[in-house]
Amino acid sequence: MENKQPNIDERLLKPYESKNTESKIYKIWEDSGLFNPDECIKKGVTKADAPVFSMVLPPPNVTGTLHMGHALMLTVEDILVRFNRMRGKRTLWVPGTDHAAIATQSKVEKIIYKEEGKNRHDLGREEFLKRVEKFAQDSHDTIVNQMKTMGVSVDWSREAYTLDEKRNLAVRTAFKKMYDEGLIYRGHRIVNWDPKGQTTVSDDEVVYEERKAKFYTFKYSKDFPISISTTRPETKVGDTAVAVHPDDPRYKKFVGKEYDANFAGVHIHVKIVADETVDKEFGTGALGVTPAHSMTDWDIAERHDLPRPQVINEYAKMMVDAPLLKGKKTTEAREIVVEWLRQEGLLEKEEEVSQNISTAERTGGIIEPLPKLQWFLNVNKEFTLADSKIDGIPSGSDTTLKEIMKKTVENGQINIVPDHFKKTYFHWIENLRDWCISRQIWFGHRIPVWYKGEEIYCGINAPEGEGWTQDSDTLDTWFSSGLWTFSVLGWPEKTEDLRIYHPTDILETGYEILFFWVARMILMTGYILGDIPFKKVYLHGTVRDAQGRKMSKSLGNGIDPIVIADKYGADAARIALVIGAGPGTDTRIYEDKIKGQKHFANKIWNVARFVLSNVNSENLGEKPEKFSPENEAILAELKNVAKQATANIENDRLHIAAEEIYQYFWHVFADKIIEDSKEKLNGGKANETRWMLKTVLETSLKLIHPFMPFVTEEVWEIVNNHFGNKTKNLIMVGEWPEA
RNA sequence: GGGCGACUAGCUCAGAUGGUUAGAGCGUUACAUUGACAUUGUAAAGGUCACAGGUUCGAUUCCUGUGUCGCCCACCA
């Protein structure tokens, strides 16, 4: 071979070692300040009037550490950001973390209980919150380090936290505006009460588990004319009606009649009502109405103006006065009531059925529907949107939150990728009910409402004067995350950031939080700013293991992205995550896949070694004005690869872009171009071949950079030194190859 | 019950607006090689693109139906 010459960087003489390189490179990036667009302008790498590209990081929960799903998210977003930055755009990516109210609180409660045997009430609100904040801080620090390990080019100077001072002001300001306009109201409603967590949970935080249950058919008393069925006989002490279908010939004659009965020692007064919602075919076709402990029954009771006595309390215990049941847990009470029915000869049938039981996602507690005084956000109430940038909702016209959520996506102002998630989104909106925003937990944004006797005050700050007490509830965590795109940019202040970077360009997140979060951001931004929060929603899939199972703690099949990055390099993990994962598609990840990409990093390294050992400032002559046809063809193909990559990234096909670049680099550049060049380097076209190799190498590095930023930055530096380039720009702000 | 999606090589997956012999990685087999390469390269085997109809000059791609799997939503008291 031509040489094993001294003038090649000695780093290249050994195989590529990601371990120390990556942390070193990250430090160089951070020190450069170029993650911050203001700094890019100051240093002249970005024009002040360049087009803007902005994005917020979906803030990870401060409940622990990042998993592979986060790694995928960070990778996809970093690719988009690096690509746009290299294209010369004024690029901002704002990082942050989410306090994740109930998730974090219950996690800390578990730890404290395990270690000290105490619950939060033993510690008291103040001490408990101190503990949670400490935990959140530690967790935050871990997460930040993990993000750096993955190579994210976020602007740390703008980092935010959903529960910091500025975001708290945003929350209070938004709450007050909604309260003043009557969109936020307080009311008795059936809520999903979690007796284990002692709090309300939203509909979306309820998960259903299938279990076997007994389905009992019986009458309230001997002289009661209609049999009813239920899986929860203990709730029947709270019945105030039996509902039948208006057209049901069996029961028509009873409608309107009222009966008294002694049911398991509790006096009940039951009216027969006719209601369209009753299914004639199900059970006996007659439904015992328990208004206080069932959503649908509550609605029936409301329609027929029935009393709604509560018979179960917050601890899932019976609160009736009958000696048989008083203070008993619901499960015990069920046995007691069934036994009573047997003895009285009222039980007619007992069947085994499988039933979906509601549980709380975070604590696993069995949901007890209870009527409670809660805060709600009305999604159907009309209000006037004073200043609107939403197509189809003119400024000054009346609209609803639901309409805002619908219109912005319908009219294409917000695009969802992949497209079919739009259908899911609309379907969800159709069925959306008022959003219960209060939580009976301590960790979170305290509701900005104060009471003094009968007086209620809602304000950004506490009211003047003595004797006011603040509402003890906190807000659903998604209330503050709903403001995220603009609260991180400084709202409610009228900041420059807000003017320049909002609405953001893309929101990249997992499809599983389309409703929790994406929809709520659209709602909040529409209401508060009369605008959209982002132009495009890019949804990534779930990361699964080699067998296609979800990664979970209980299965123990999780792969820690940090362990992987340590072993194979973050570059390898990144490109392994992206290749084969189109938007909205689940992807499988396993060590062999990542190992393969580590080889790719090494391939880049070796290609650089080959090129630099054959091309250097001494043997490189004048750049030829015209290349021979064969080299011309090579450069044309290179240009075409760049063009394809650009188009694919712009059209959300990162997986294709990554694969094509990989294919080109390995199987065209390394296997063909370099192999062919070995001969040419000794022939008459040696100089133009050197130029060609240098050009292909440098251009390829740029194309690979968004996907594998560390190794490309390292090689870039070596290349620059090798040729003694004076302007030593980082590849991170290098110019993206012309398409 | 309602909705959404998937089904392509042994395995994991690409195949945007229908158009020659359907692609990659891993795996398998053969050969080469002290090579820029903790190897790598060259080549090979391997596919009724789930099934059945339809539209079309032409369907893996569009339409209808069937089957299997997965996910989301609702929830029957």
Image (spheres, grey):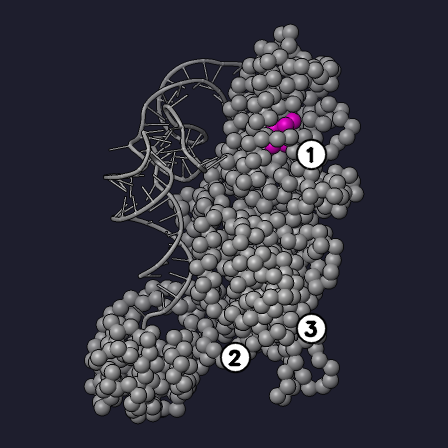
Circle nearer the N terminus (1, 2): 2
Identify the residue at image location x=69%, y=34%: A734
On whether disc 1 and disc 2 are found on a single subunit, the reply is: yes
Chain letter, disc 3 residue: A
> Which residue does the numbered mark 1 point to in the structure image?
A734
Query: Mark 2 falls on what kind of element?
Result: strand
Q: Quadrant of residue B74?
A: bottom left
In the depicted structure, whether residue A199 falls above or below residue B59: below
Chain letter, disc 1 residue: A
Q: Quadrant of residue A79?
A: top right
- Inspect the image, locate mark 3, and give the three-letter code of the amino acid beneath it: Ile
A170 lies left or right of A240? right
- The alpha-carbon separation of the residues under discs 1 and 3 comes to 46 Å
> Which residue does the numbered mark 3 point to in the structure image?
A460
A500 lies left or right of A249? right
Considering every residue shown, the one lying at the far top of the view is A684
In the depicted structure, whether residue A7 falls above or below residue A161: above
x and y percent of residue A468 in the render? 67, 84
Task: Give the magenta range.
Answer: A698-703
User: Which mark, by number, is residue A187?
Assistant: 2
In the depicted structure, whether residue A257 falls above or below residue A488: below
x and y percent of residue A480 in the render? 61, 64
- The alpha-carbon separation of the residues under discs 3 and 2 comes to 22 Å
Query: Mark 3 falls on what kind of element?
Result: loop
Q: Quadrant of residue B24?
A: top left
- The alpha-carbon separation of the residues under discs 1 and 2 comes to 57 Å
- Inspect the image, locate mark 2, and give the three-letter code of the amino acid beneath it: Gly
Chain letter, disc 2 residue: A
- Inspect the image, locate mark 1, and give the three-letter code of the amino acid beneath it: Gly
